[in-house]
Image: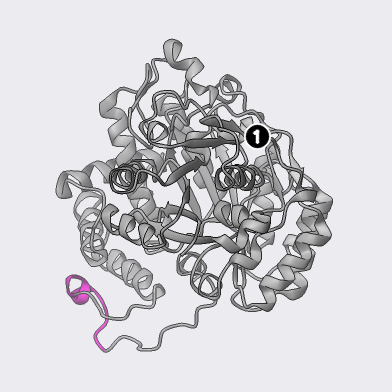
């Protein structure tokens, strides 16, 4: 039983709700009357309703995000029918802007916009004490980190062992990219460093292996980021993995030196490039020094073992298919292990919509509000790019085809156009972009390489077999047996100390 129930629908079980743990940590005297229960979007809404109501809460706080707003709306609608006296409070980025007209907002009693770390406790105290009526929309002031209780003790043992644990050294972003909610989150505020390091030590002592820092600009303050990296390096062990989101054109010597001392694969940098087109960058208020970016990539690939996850966005105003292709090819040449090809989304509150009329930006009305077409890329072309992004993630990013993927463009001038051709061919054969069996995908890639591109079957088979074994698999697929040496495959799986996806990129 709990008077206050904090809950959300995570995108996957492996994700642990960071924001809810902040709310629980900062409930003060009400903490003893609260509990946290997490679900994921693959669970049936009525099963979620049943589990929530079993706690007999008086107040339910829901974390609302772009990926869960629709199923959460269904959950809340059912709770309203079954037990209408429960007070429902919403918070999160999806309900912090443009609240008018949202179905989920209409179902709620209160919506806390902005960072609700402290405001949630204040609202709950008022509701439980029958205080004066509260407005429906309640704006939270930016909390001072010095007043916040950090939430890391609320990660349970099973979270530490099996889920992604999120950490932040700062909040906010100094940049003003018009497609991003972080551009609205100013100023940048830092967690007091001694307190953060103490919490990191406690997580290490509890056996945490994978740390995902959610700072939008981890390397903004070089002194702070270097201190954290040195702290982690001194305590690092095989199996540790640290993820950071980095500003791509900011990597001074102070950071380079410490980064180079980490073992291969232990660091992952998420690097948001988004576009290589300076005119597009200017349109969306994105500042970027491409020469420094290229130099930093070169250094990371030649002198460190950092796993680089780089982002590009399809559909930005002013970006043609050809300029995107040129940017993709330029990024391929820089050699990141992964390239996330994202489809532009119209996140609530972001100023990207100021370009709608001039550039003909047309958005899907339902989450995740992806762009459908614009003045330069029509809907059929955008669909091709959407499929390109899906197949690239499955083939190019997964690590399952690390050596085979470059064969797709082995004799082509443009890796982008070569992969787009493969993407079109694959979709014509399958008619879908997901739920593709790995061996079936290998067989289709072998067929494409040998029939469409006229590659030597023995070379194609040996390359695919090498990739297959790199993933720890040794059951030789039947379609390639005639092209491979006879005899049993090796039976021992290689030892793995990194996450599977990243480990495949190292072999």
Q: Is residue 151 left or right of residue 499?
A: right
- Number of labels in the image equals 1
The x, y position of residue 456, in whole percent, is 26, 61
Outermost residue, front direction? 130
- Residue 261 in sight from this viewpoint: no
User: Is 455 situated above or below 321?
Assistant: below
Q: Is residue 499 left or right of residue 53?
A: right
Residue situated in front as seen by the camera: 399 or 54: 54
Region rendered in magenta = 478-487
User: Is 479 situated above or below 62?
Assistant: below
Residue situated in front as seen by the camera: 296 or 155: 155
**Which residue is painted at 60% across and 39% down in the image?**
131
- Residue 310 in sight from this viewpoint: yes
The x, y position of residue 23, in whole percent, is 60, 52
Q: State the predominant SS element of the stretch in magenta.
A: helix
Whether residue 484 is in magenta: the answer is yes
User: Is 350 situated above or below 443?
Assistant: above
**Which residue is painted at 29% across and 35% down in the image?**
384
Quadrant of residue 13 in the image? bottom left
Q: Secondary structure at mark 1?
A: loop
The x, y position of residue 247, in whole percent, is 67, 43
**Which residue is painted at 67% across and 46% down in the image?**
118
Q: Is residue 456 left or right of residue 237?
A: left
Residue situated in front as seen by the camera: 251 or 177: 177
Quadrant of residue 402 in the image? bottom left
Residue situated in front as seen by the camera: 345 or 486: 345
Outermost residue, top direction? 358
The x, y position of residue 95, in whole percent, is 48, 35
Residue holding disc 1: 185
């Amino acid at each position: 039983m709990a008077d206050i129930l904090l809950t959300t629908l995570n995108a996957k079980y492996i994700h642990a709700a960071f924001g809810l743990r902040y709310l629980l940590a900062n409930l003060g005297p009400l903490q003893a009357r609260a509990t946290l229960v997490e679900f994921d979007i693959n669970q049936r809404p009525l099963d979620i309703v049943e589990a929530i109501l079993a706690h007999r809460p008086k107040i339910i706080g829901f974390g609302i995000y772009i990926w869960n707003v629709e199923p959460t709306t269904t959950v809340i609608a059912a709770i309203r029918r079954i037990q209408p006296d429960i007070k429902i409070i919403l918070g999160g980025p999806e309900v912090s802007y443009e609240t008018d007209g949202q179905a989920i907002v209409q179902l709620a009693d209160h919506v806390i916009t902005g960072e609700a770390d402290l405001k949630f406790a204040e609202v709950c105290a008022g509701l439980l004490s029958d205080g004066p009526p509260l407005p429906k929309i309640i704006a939270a002031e930016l909390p001072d980190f010095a007043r916040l209780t950090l939430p890391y003790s609320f990660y349970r043992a099973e979270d530490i062992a099996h889920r992604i644990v999120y950490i932040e050294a700062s909040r906010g972003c100094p940049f003003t990219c018009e497609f991003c909610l972080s551009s609205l989150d100013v100023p940048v505020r830092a967690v007091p460093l001694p307190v953060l390091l103490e919490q990191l030590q406690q997580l290490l002592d509890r056996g945490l292996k994978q740390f995902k820092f959610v700072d939008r600009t981890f390397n903004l303050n070089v002194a702070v980021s270097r201190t954290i990296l040195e702290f982690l390096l001194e305590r690092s062990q095989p199996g540790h993995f640290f993820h950071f989101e980095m500003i791509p054109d900011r990597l001074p010597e102070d950071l380079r030196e410490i980064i180079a001392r980490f073992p291969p694969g232990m660091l992952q940098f998420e690097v948001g490039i988004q576009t290589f087109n300076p005119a597009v960058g200017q349109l969306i208020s994105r500042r970027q020094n491409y020469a420094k970016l290229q130099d930093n990539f070169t250094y990371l690939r030649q002198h460190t073992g950092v796993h680089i996850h780089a982002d590009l966005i399809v559909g930005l105003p002013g970006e043609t298919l050809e300029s995107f292709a040129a940017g993709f090819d330029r990024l391929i040449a820089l050699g990141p292990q992964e390239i996330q090809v994202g489809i532009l989304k119209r996140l609530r509150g972001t100023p990207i919509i100021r370009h709608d009329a001039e550039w003909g930006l047309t958005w899907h009305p339902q989450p995740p509000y992806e762009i459908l077409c614009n003045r330069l890329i029509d809907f059929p072309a955008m669909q091709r790019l959407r499929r390109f992004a899906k197949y690239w993630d499955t083939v190019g990013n997964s690590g399952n085809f690390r050596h085979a993927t470059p064969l797709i463009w082995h004799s082509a001038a443009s890796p982008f156009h070569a992969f787009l051709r493969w993407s079109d061919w694959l979709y014509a054969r399958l008619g879908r972009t997901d739920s593709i069996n790995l061996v079936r995908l290998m067989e289709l890639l072998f067929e494409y390489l040998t029939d469409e591109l006229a590659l030597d079957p023995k070379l194609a088979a040996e390359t695919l077999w090498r990739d297959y074994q790199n993933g720890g698999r040794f059951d030789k697929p039947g379609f390639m047996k005639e092209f491979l040496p006879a005899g049993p495959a090796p039976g021992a799986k290689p030892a793995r100390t990194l996450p599977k996806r990243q480990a495949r990129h190292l072999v």
